Image (cartoon, rainbow, N blue to C red):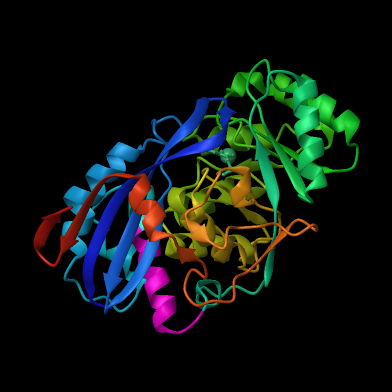
Amino acid sequence: MKIEQITLREVRMRLKAPFETSFGVTQDRRILLVEAIADGVTGWGEITTIETPSYNSETTDTAWHIVSDFIAPQLVGKDLASGAEIPVVLEGIRGHYMAKSGVENALWDIEAQQKALALWKWLGGTRSEIDCGVSLGIRESPQALVNKVSQELQSGYQRIKLKIKRGKDLEYAAAVRRQFPDIRLSVDANSAYRLNDIDHLRKLDEFNLLMIEQPLEWDDIYSHATLQARVRTAICLDECINNERQALSAIQLGACRIINIKLGRVGGHSSARQIHDLCFERGVPVWCGGMLESGIGRAHNIAMSTLPGFTLPGDVSASSRYWAEDIIEPEVEVTPRGTIPAPADVGLGYTVKKELIQRLTVRSQSWKDRVQVSA
Ligand code: OSB
Ligand code: MG
């Protein structure tokens, strides 16, 4: 696979509604797209950073810097056997997993097309449809949240996840659980609490939740082990798990019973699959998290979610929940039973709407062999 060209674009996309988490409110997304060409074949990836360093330490702008100053110049002109070599080739760049992931995943798209296979099959996926849940932002009142949950359940979603923060947690979870006693329900704190909140967090046990996602600090696996020993509900780690080594530490310490795998956070399909395989061997269920992606990131999430260990519904949902118009065709739709069928076509399995992307682009840069071309 000879990498001939890499193009990085920043597109601006407005979410249909603001999304509130414990770290802030997002509506205007600044998304980086990677278009790679190898052996004449084009592949696409998405860099799933958000705009501020409040989920992890990366941002749209740090990713732009890392791809344009380090990753793209290093890769163009290189001949690789597989996209799976990327983590080794880019070993000299520490961290910046989301920046790396966007590039690596574009190469996986190319490779699948070269093998004339759907990406999900090339990755080793076994599910022909994936189970879907939704992640609901913090609302102004418990009743507003209950109404939103009701609407999502009517669309067929199999699991509801509530974003929580201090002061907007117990009352909200209680209201939803009271209205819907039997649904699969979880909460995600995005690191809003500290270990001395144990007594408070234990109160969540009474709501029969599927999991409590990332309650404590983003980089603290050990404290989650202390917490998991004191709460009945399963802890799920998101922010804490960036690679297979951290997943192993978390499992061995008993810091969680479930892991959320996000392609960007862990550096791309190779690392995601390693974490998946580790969890699968050890009987730890995994599911696919979301980062308010455009259709390109969503298509990669769908492919990954077909691996056998993805036994819990993920945060991968319909394009129309996020965007007036998505950048892929067909848009991602959810069946009335709350699933997304894996696409039949080769590669990503969706058509990228290049004209729309051009209209949404606010800056772009291309690298071709060793020559840098400004666009
Ligand atoms: O923690 O899962 C998270 C969005 C941005 C940053 C972090 C998270 C989220 C979500 C949204 O929960 C999931 C989605 O619908 O894409
Ligand atoms: Mg999360």
Query: Which residue is more in the foreground, 288 or 110?
Result: 110
Outermost residue, bottom side: 115
Question: What secondary structure is the magenta-colored segment mainly?
Answer: helix
* Whether residue 311 can be seen here: yes
- The span shown in magenta is 103-117
Outermost residue, top side: 167
Query: Which residue is more in the foreground, 343 or 288?
Result: 343
Q: Quadrant of the N terminus?
A: bottom left
- Residue appearing at x 34%, y 71% in the figure: 42
Q: Ligand 1 is located in which of the four quadrants? A: top right
* Left or right: where 104 falls relative to 313: left
Is 248 rendered above or below residue 148? Answer: below
Residue 232 location, x and y as percent? 78, 36
Is 258 rendered above or below residue 120? Answer: above
Residue 215 location, x and y as percent? 61, 31
* Whether residue 278 can be seen here: no
- Residue appearing at x 60%, y 24% in the figure: 195
- Residue appearing at x 23%, y 76% in the figure: 2
* Left or right: where 313 falls relative to 360: right
* Residue 104, magenta (yes or no): yes
> So how many labels did they put on this image?
0
Residue 94 location, x and y as percent? 28, 48
* Left or right: where 16 falls relative to 102: right
* Residue 227, magenta (yes or no): no
Residue 83 location, x and y as percent? 35, 70
